[in-house]
């Protein structure tokens, strides 16, 4: 889903269609990581201090357990869809600039 979002941004940014495929793939990968980082930051921002402390305990476990992280977010961030959508819109505006 995020890669499709990034590819749409690249089209809106008018990235040349004849761009080297390896460069385009790396650009998509880099932008996808940045989008994920922003979404994660916004989800963390939405946590209370108590939730954040509990979340950090999950993150500190070795080895990291992505399923536990996902379950915690599902159970504790009630408006995660709105937060994610907001982060996507924020990233879009940051990447494309203000609408003319």
Image (cartoon, rainbow, N blue to C red):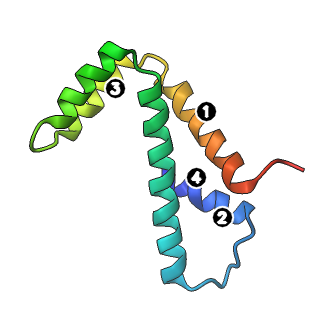
Task: Tell me where residue 92 appears, x and y as whole percent.
Answer: 67, 48
Placement of 30 over or under 54, stated as above or below:
below
Q: Secondary structure at mark 3?
A: helix
Q: Secondary structure at mark 1?
A: helix
Observer-nearest of 53 and 8: 53
| Residue reaching furthest to the left | 62
At x 62%, y 83%, the residue is 19
Observer-nearest of 15 and 17: 15
Marks 2 and 1, the one that precedes in the sequence? 2
Task: Tell me where residue 49 appears, x and y as whole percent.
Answer: 35, 16
Pointer 4 local density, CA inside 10 Å: few below 14, some 14–19, many at least 20: some
At x 10%, y 44%, the residue is 63
The residues bearing labels 2 and 3 have C-alpha atoms spaced at a distance of 29 Å
Q: Which residue is mark 3?
A: 73
Q: Which residue is mark 2?
A: 10
Q: Is residue 43 left or right of residue 76?
A: right
Q: Which residue is mark 1?
A: 86
Observer-nearest of 17 and 69: 69
Q: Is residue 1 visible?
A: no
Query: Based on the displayed image, in which of its 4 quarters is residue 75 positioned?
Result: top left
Query: Based on the displayed image, in which of its 4 quarters is residue 85 positioned?
Result: top right
The residues bearing labels 3 and 4 have C-alpha atoms spaced at a distance of 22 Å
Question: Are the residues at dot 2 and dot 1 in contact (C-beta closer than 8 Å)?
Answer: no
Task: Tell me where residue 74 appears, x and y as whole percent.
Answer: 34, 23
At x 31%, y 17%, the residue is 51
Pointer 1 local density, CA inside 10 Å: few below 14, some 14–19, many at least 20: some
Q: Which residue is mark 4?
A: 5
């Amino acid at each position: 889903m995020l890669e499709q979002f990034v590819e749409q941004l690249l089209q809106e940014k008018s990235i040349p269609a004849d761009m080297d495929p390896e460069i385009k793939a790396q650009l998509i990968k880099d932008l996808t990581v940045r989008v994920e980082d922003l979404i994660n930051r916004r989800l963390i921002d939405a946590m209370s201090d108590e939730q954040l402390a509990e979340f950090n305990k999950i993150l500190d476990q070795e080895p990291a357990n992505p399923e536990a992280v996902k379950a915690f977010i599902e159970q504790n961030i009630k408006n995660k869809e709105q937060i994610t959508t907001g982060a996507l819109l924020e990233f879009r505006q940051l990447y494309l600039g203000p609408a003319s």
